Amino acid sequence: MTGVIRYNRDGDIAMIAIDNPPVNALGQAVRQGLVEAVEKAEADGARAALIYGEGRSFPAGADIREFGKPPLEPWLPDVCNRLETSPVLVVSALHGTALGGGLEIALASDYRIATPAAKVGLPEVLIGVMPGAGGTQRLPRLVGVETSIDVITSGRQISAGEAFDLGIIDRVEDGAPRDIGLSYTRALLAENAPRRPIREMPAPQPIDFDAAYDSALRKARGQISPAYAVRGIQAACELPFEEGLTRERELFRALLETDQRQGLIHAFFAERAVGVLAELKDTNARDVNSVAVIGGGTMGAGIATSFLLAGFPVTLLEMSEDAAHAARGRITGNLSGALKRGKIDQKTYDRLTGPALALTTSYDDLREADLVIEAVFEDMNVKRDVFSRLDAICKPGAVLATNTSYLDINKIADATQRPEDVIGLHFFSPAHVMKLLEVVVADRTAPDTVATGFALAKRLKKTAVRAGVCDGFIGNRILAAYRAAADHMVLDGATPYDIDAAIREFGFAMGPFQVSDLAGLDIAWAARKRRAATRDPRERVPLVADRLCEAGLFGQKTGQGYYLYNETPPKPNPEVAGIIESARETLGIKPRAFSRPEIQRRYLCAMVNEAAKVVGDGIARRPLDVDVVLLMGYGFPRYRGGPLKWADMDGLPKILSDITAYAQDDRYFWSPAPLLEQLVAEGRTFDDLNKGAGK
């Protein structure tokens, strides 16, 4: 028996405990131990075997340490088959999270019991593969095709209560998994309950699988693993069980070879690596128990909501009683949404909208806050004035944070006598929903202030990415570049609607002009006007966007922008064509046609080129930091791994060649990033820079 499996007997019952902390992952030793344990149970003459997990969970899935390595025997499908064909009655007692292979182990058992807090699921599609140990063959026989498609193609986690209602779990009972499992197994033996291998259950009724395949592909915006999983479920309907297992494994192996699987695995590990920073290795965060927010507009209210939901008492400062009242309304609305979605209960809602939230119009009420974060108008003078006031009244050691999206945090910090306490915490809208937080480190920010930013992100259940100071930091700086590439293509002959369609086809949920309408065209317009005095004369100005704003067309907030919003779905705004034509005449441009592949190529090359400059300049420490920001904050399709992972897979020499070709028409905009040129010259990739970084 391997060291991670413990075996003993309780009468006629073989007790098989999985003890592989922290989450009992199904590594080789666990798999081998399970086979040895069930063989011993059979040799011992046990009537039943109970499988349960020690610690905090039933097996929560595969061992991530084995990702990307050659598989070691016994393979999980063989383990599941061995359990299912054993003459011993096999029971699984689930707690914590029984996901992926963990649920497949449970499905290979005859009966399943779970604690009320347990969650189950088959989330393999989220890392670009599909269940490969019988999940697509057993689950449909147990709960039917429609339910299986929902569970498997979504990859969602299912509560024990729902799993019981669906028929995945046979019983839900409170208590330690060993205790409830033993009691249940004893009851089954007392009733002479039969073995109940799912493989012997009737095949489920088929549906229109071609339609289901197309639907899965459409919902996933081109990600193929959910659609492949549909084909696996189809095999459960059309093939004998063993042949269905073979077909499932063929589909699983095909997905292993795809770029999408590489992209999703990269995203999985990158999101775990962004918080690993050498500079914070021996640095403790400051204690933060009370929070103040300055500004109660959409962003400030969202930030306040985020902290309230994380358990912080919040004081929100506004400039007038009316503004404070409006801010309370926004926060209450956010929390009402959380209540409706079941994220909080009524008691919590009452507390968060009552004693946990204080509104004020006086800076004096911020004196004792451990953290103050401003979310006021994006104007340097306004923000410096706020920080000057905070410097005068906040207690020593308080963290002073700005939510600026673009402005120089060094200049903001200079308005205080404590620049070491100043940091950027750039939330993304809506702040109480979006999971990304850019932690922007100024020149004199203290290490423990940085550590506090990352600790806060963890408490807020957000992913923090370290960024340096520049105009736009990581995300908005790169956004400005690829958004400019889209504007250039409009001037040169493409329509905004061609571009939006091409970018959606690549896998984004929305195209850049749809996003601009949603965010408000006036926001980027204000940034362009702010930078106008320092603009390089070689830069192409986005005349179309400026003229839309001059006409008062700011997007959804005014009902008109690139699209009209007086009906659903929005329609292209017919005024835009005339504005584009006028801008072309002003600049003397003769338009040409752009294919969708060329649109995508220019858009992505601009993104990659600027991202390489961001890494080369040290604004992002590693390429994976860029990838996480674009994945979590800007809608880059997750299955492509992020722009720099996509670039590695596409080939850096090809990308550099295209950028060099584009530069023949616009050498200023298409100036190749020195880091990109260096990597190509050395035959290296962005991922080479990730390896070993941050440790």
Image (spheres, grey):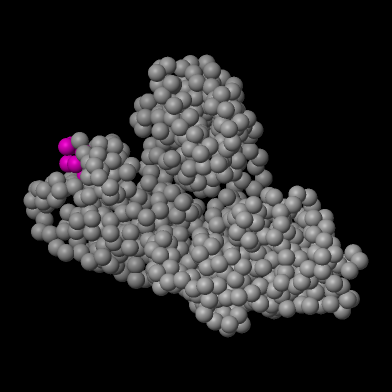
Residue 428: image x %, image y %? 44, 42
Residue 10: image x %, image y %? 90, 64
Pick the front one: 689 or 291: 291
Residue 395: image x %, image y %? 59, 22
Give the position of the C terminus as an image quadrant.
bottom right
Magenta-colored stretch includes residue 204: no
132 above or below 395? below
Give the residue at the far front of this rendering. 191
Q: Residue at x 54, y 69 (%)?
A: 130
436 above or below 503? above
Question: Picture quarter containing residue 243?
Answer: bottom right
Give the residues in magenta. Answer: 545-551
Question: Taking the image as drawn, is residue 444 in sight?
Answer: no
Q: Main secondary structure of the magenta part?
A: helix
Give the position of the N terminus as an image quadrant.
bottom right
Residue 231: image x %, image y %? 48, 74
